[in-house]
Amino acid sequence: MMVISAIDLLDGKVVRLVKGDPDNKTIYSDDPVKVAERWAAEGAEMLHVVDLDAALQTGTNNRKMIYEIAASIQIPVQAAGGIRSVEIINEMLKNVNKIVLGTIAFQDPALIGKMIKKKKERIVLAVDHRGGTVVVNGWKEKTNFSIQNAIYDFQAVGISEFLLTSVEKDGTLSGPDFSSLRHASAFPGIKIIASGGVSSLEDILRARTAGCSSIILGKALYDRRISIAHARALA
């Protein structure tokens, strides 16, 4: 199981939100590149960089900073947050290794079906959910998709990697939604990235047992509850 470190960007700073609420945030650094280099040096196998400004539609974005981060380290960078047009998708794919699509995918599944023919190994579907229902637009809007329906429909068009985030768990250090992770991982031929609520090494073991291919470390890593070295030893 791959260990991925998260860097969430808001107004150019590294932050962590609780349940996606920008009014409930902790600022960890005003130097994202330095943080990226630190996680890479400590053994992270990939960085998951989220543009919260773009996701929350604050009127700005952090794409240039994401590209600077990608250029500064030797490990892969996976970018997420507010990637909602073909132009931004193409730009992102020139600068990072993978992109995570959410809102645009659920609004226009046919478009994603066309795009992934050449790039499917570089596209991850974000299955952000609240109570088992997929949410989009910065976690503010419900869809008609369940987790299972989302995986089934997008696997049919060629997506094979899914990032599951429980909004209710994210940033809470209360442990992931293991039930959802187990059910999702039971689908044949796909990979599940676990995200949201990871708080301990036990959580990493349980995510591995649930069948996840990767796990994203956020607040627990920043608060030094978990080290990357220990996480990798168990993953």
Image (spheres, rainbow, N blue to C red):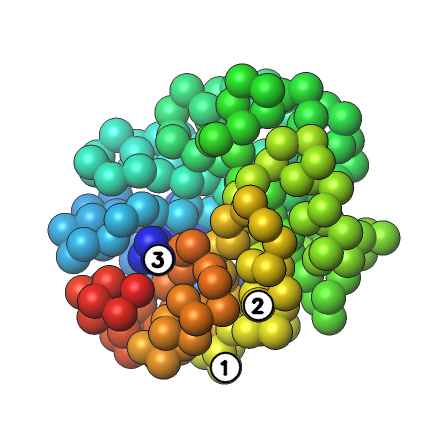
The residue shown at (50%, 49%) is 191
Of badges 3 and 1, the one in the foreground is 3
Q: Which residue is mark 2?
A: 182
Q: Which residue is mark 1?
A: 174
Secondary structure under the numbered disc 3 in the rendered image? loop
Please state which of residues 158 and 88 is positioned toward the viewer in this rendering: 158
Q: Is residue 11 visible?
A: no
Gap between marks 3 and 1, in whole Å?
21 Å
Give the x, y percent position of residue 78: 41, 40
Q: Amino acid at mark 1?
A: Ser
- How many other residues sit within 10 Å of disc 2, few (<14), some (14-19) or many (≥20)? some
Gap between marks 3 and 2, in whole Å?
14 Å
Residue 1 - label: 3
Secondary structure under the numbered disc 2 in the rendered image? helix
Please state which of residues 190 and 229 is positioned toward the viewer in this rendering: 190
Q: Amino acid at mark 3?
A: Met
Q: Earlier in the sequence, mark 2 or mark 1?
A: 1
Residue 48 - label: none
Give the x, y percent position of residue 209: 43, 71
Give the x, y percent position of residue 109: 75, 32
Q: Is residue 79 visible?
A: yes
Q: Is residue 225 positioned above or below 87 on the image?
A: below
Q: Earlier in the sequence, mark 3 or mark 2?
A: 3
Q: Earlier in the sequence, mark 3 or mark 1?
A: 3
Secondary structure under the numbered disc 1 in the rendered image? loop
